[in-house]
Image (spheres, grey):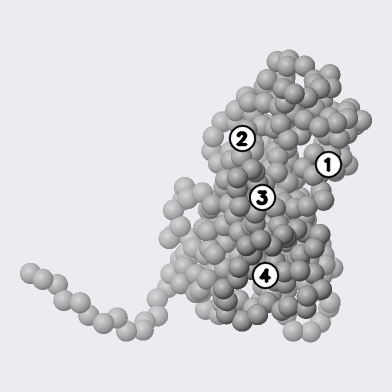
Amino acid sequence: MRGKSTTQGSFVSLIDIETLIAPDHPIRRIKALVDEVLRGMDAHFEEMYVEGGRPSIPPERLLKAKVLQALFTVRSDRQLCARLQTDLMFRWFIDLPLDEAVFDPSTFSQNQQRLLRHAVADLFFAEVVALAKKHGWISNDHFSVDGTLIQAWASIKSFKPKGSNQGPGTGNPWTDFKGEKRSNDTHESTTDPEAKLIRKGKGQEARLCFAGHATMENRNGLCVLFEVRSAVGEPESEVAVDQAVELKNRGFRLKSIGADKGYHTAGFVEGVREYGIKPHPALCENRDRMGIRRSGAYTVSQRIRKRIEEIFGWVKTTGGFRKSRYRGVERNHAAGQYVVAALNLLRMAKLFVTDPPGWAQA
């Protein structure tokens, strides 16, 4: 007999959300890791807020929400808040009670300056890396570096001559750039002046972009440093040396750094050697080898360094960071910290239940 569909009225029910989340769901391990990271940041959060006054949204919830946004490819803060309204697992993850209203999407923008001023995104990412190091998941010796381009939100139509006093305009008017020579020296975007016009390679179109620079450890492929910088004026090879120095300042004992052919430059090779690090870039046939030998360690470095592309692949697809939603280097850098930290947390959760691979001997 056909069943009848009845209208469901409002009702009161006792629900234990813990029973709705599968015991072996990886989100449980990720939440445990995030909670441990945030406990280590508690003193920093205390310094961010004054005593007294109206209670604010806990910063822990905002950071957990950013992790969810990357893990589940939520495209905007507004959509994230809408998902929090209906998804019990999302509420459970950020510790938001069922009888408490979801905060407004503007909460993220209202708290952005405070989070940027206190470098919360950088500290959160650093704490995730420190937790991975505590568990022995990070190599202390062998690393890989690479860079990628992050598309800016600004349209190519906003790239206009400097000093022309032309505003963004209204609508989406037709624009003809044929025959006009444009460069970063003479033009800038009226939407995002910090975005730079650059092409990835010959035969490809030029786009307004930022540059993402990553350093990966070679044991489990975790990202230990990620920076968003201007796409022009800061070569990948120079940024890689800066990141190597930063890792040394954080207590890492770097022995080798693998990289692609773009790092076969005197600046990179001599720069890392100055700090006692062996450079292992892919060699260009028409350049001086600068004393680099294709030893067994070099071969291992070249094999493992390709895994850094997996980081960029996840960040741009699942993490939704192929095209930025923010303007300016500072905000995009902060957004990148949350996305790459989410990837690290996902991989760390998997390491809890799988045997660690053999140590990389690069």
Determine which quarter of the picture holds residue 259: top right
Where is residue 334? Give x, y as percent. 73, 60
Q: Earlier in the sequence, mark 2 or mark 1?
A: 1
- Residue drawn at (53%, 63%) of the image: 74
Of marks 3 and 1, the one in the foreground: 3
Q: Earlier in the sequence, mark 3 or mark 1?
A: 3
How many C-alpha atoms fall within 10 Å of the one at disc 3: few (<14), some, or many (≥20)? Answer: some
Q: Are marks 3 and 1 in contact (CB under 8 Å)?
A: no
The residue identified by callout 1 is 238
How many C-alpha atoms fall within 10 Å of the one at disc 2: few (<14), some, or many (≥20)? Answer: some
- Which element carries disc 3, helix, strand or loop? loop
Residue 146 lies left or right of residue 276; in this view the side is left
How many C-alpha atoms fall within 10 Å of the one at disc 4: few (<14), some, or many (≥20)? Answer: many
Residue type at the position of mark 1: Glu
Report how far apart the C-alphas of labels 3 and 1 lie in the structure.
19 Å
The residue identified by callout 4 is 158
Residue type at the position of mark 2: Arg
Question: Quarter of the image containing the N terminus?
Answer: bottom left
Report how far apart the C-alphas of labels 2 and 3 lie in the structure.
24 Å
- Which element carries disc 2, helix, strand or loop? helix
